[in-house]
Image (cartoon, rainbow, N blue to C red):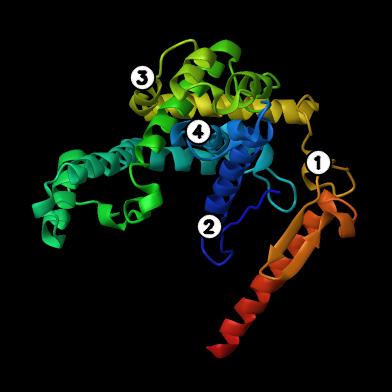
Amino acid sequence: RTNFTSLADPSAVGSGLTGLTTLMHEAGHAAHFANIKMPSPLFSQERAPTSVAYAETQSMFLDSLVGDAAWRQKYARDRAGMPIPWEIIEEDIRTTHPTKVLSLRAMLAVPYFEKALYELPDDQLDASTISNLADQIEHKIQGGLSSRPLLSVPHLLSDEASCYYHGYVLAEMAVHQTRDFFLKRDGYIVDNPSVGPTLNKSYWAVGNSQPFLTLVENLTKSPLMGDAWVGELNRPVDTVIAEEKEAYDKMAAKESNGDSKGDSKSNGDAKEEVKLDMHIKIVDGDDVIADTDADGGFLQSCQKFEEYIRDRFSSNKRAKTGAN
């Protein structure tokens, strides 16, 4: 049994992208744990010796696809089935790529703060010292006070997530190294039929029977390093745009020629059957919104959920307008 949740809000601009990224992220976890083939369930448990870095590499690899122009060209469609225009993707790249290094620094700041915090003598553990220490780390790592204060990071405030956050940094390193491996080996990632079997063989099937660093090296043929991540950050914006435009155009050509699996017609065709070999329920609290068994299939449930969201959002909007 697998549960997904989302905080996406149709009334918040950009919330859909956040919700989609979250969905892909959790689907990465599901694909990983569902494909572990070992003689005991202990090899697929979330706790030690399964590491945060190992688990998050699988989820973050899948959610990284949402940012690929080729993925967006094929799967980011409006209700008429039209792909997202290239101009929007280009604007996104020009806006976000130059500042991605700030996200790297923000990630690094959390484990560096934790390290400094745990190194403090017990007689210095008071609110003022800890607050000042957080400010010092932000200035040292991020160049100034962060828009997301370190002490607002929930992992630092709960005991089960302490000494945890560095796993995300290691996972991000592994994701970039894994993507770099596939791009050098195959030339592309989106809809590449060899990606899944490679991940399954090297990352998923063995579960936690092998250490994280060993798994990364087995797949990428290189020890875990930050080179691929740093290399991505150092790419000039115009180079990124040119390469993403090429990938976007190649996917568009595949779609128009019907060469891509699940061509563009299938994105909006509710008559085409999708068999997932699972029972899916979409719920809101105790209310069952859609049920693949009761509705007759996956796409029928998707349509029902879409109508529910549209009707609920429209009702809320009308209520707010009336109240004003």
* Distance between mark 4 and mark 2 Cα atoms: 31 Å
Structural crowding at the residue carrying mark 2, measured as other residues with C-alpha within 10 Å and reported as few (<14), some (14–19) or many (≥20): some
Q: CA distance from mark 2 to mark 3?
A: 32 Å
Mark 4 and mark 1: Cα distance apart in space: 27 Å
**75 lies left or right of 15:** right
Q: Percent position (x, y) of residue 156?
A: 32, 51
- Pointer 2 and pointer 3: residues touching (CB < 8 Å)? no
**Residues under labels 1 and 3: Cα distance?**
38 Å
Chain-order first, disc 3 or disc 4: 4
User: Which numbered disc, 2 or 1, marks the residue closer to the eye?
Assistant: 1
Asked whether the viewer can see residue 42, the reply is yes
Q: Position of residue 68 (x, y in %)?
A: 55, 33
Look at 14% across and 46% down and name the residue there.
Answer: 120
Residue 148 against residue 277 in the figure, above or below? below
Q: Give coordinates of residue 77: x percent, y percent.
A: 68, 46
Q: Which one is in front, 262 or 49? A: 49
Looking at the image, is mark 4 or mark 1 nearer the viewer?
4
Tell me residue 171's x, y (percent).
44, 32
Q: Residue at x 31, y 57 (%)?
A: 152
Q: Which amino acid does the dot numbered 3 rest on?
A: Asp
In the rendered image, which residue does mark 3 sit on?
227
Say whether residue 143 is visible: no
Q: Residues within 10 Å of mark 3 (few under 14, many from 20)?
A: few
User: Of the residues under marks 4 and 2, which one precedes in the sequence?
Assistant: 2
Between marks 2 and 1, how big is the CA–CA gap? 27 Å
> Where is mark 1, residue-wise?
276
The structure residue drawn at horizontal position 70% and vertical position 67%, both measured from the top left corner, is 310
Q: Is residue 214 left or right of residue 161?
A: right
Query: Does dot 4 land on a helix, a strand or a loop?
Result: loop
**Which residue, given by chain and number where applicable, does mark 4 sit on?**
50
Q: 59 or 227, which lies in front?
A: 59
Q: Which residue is mark 2?
A: 15
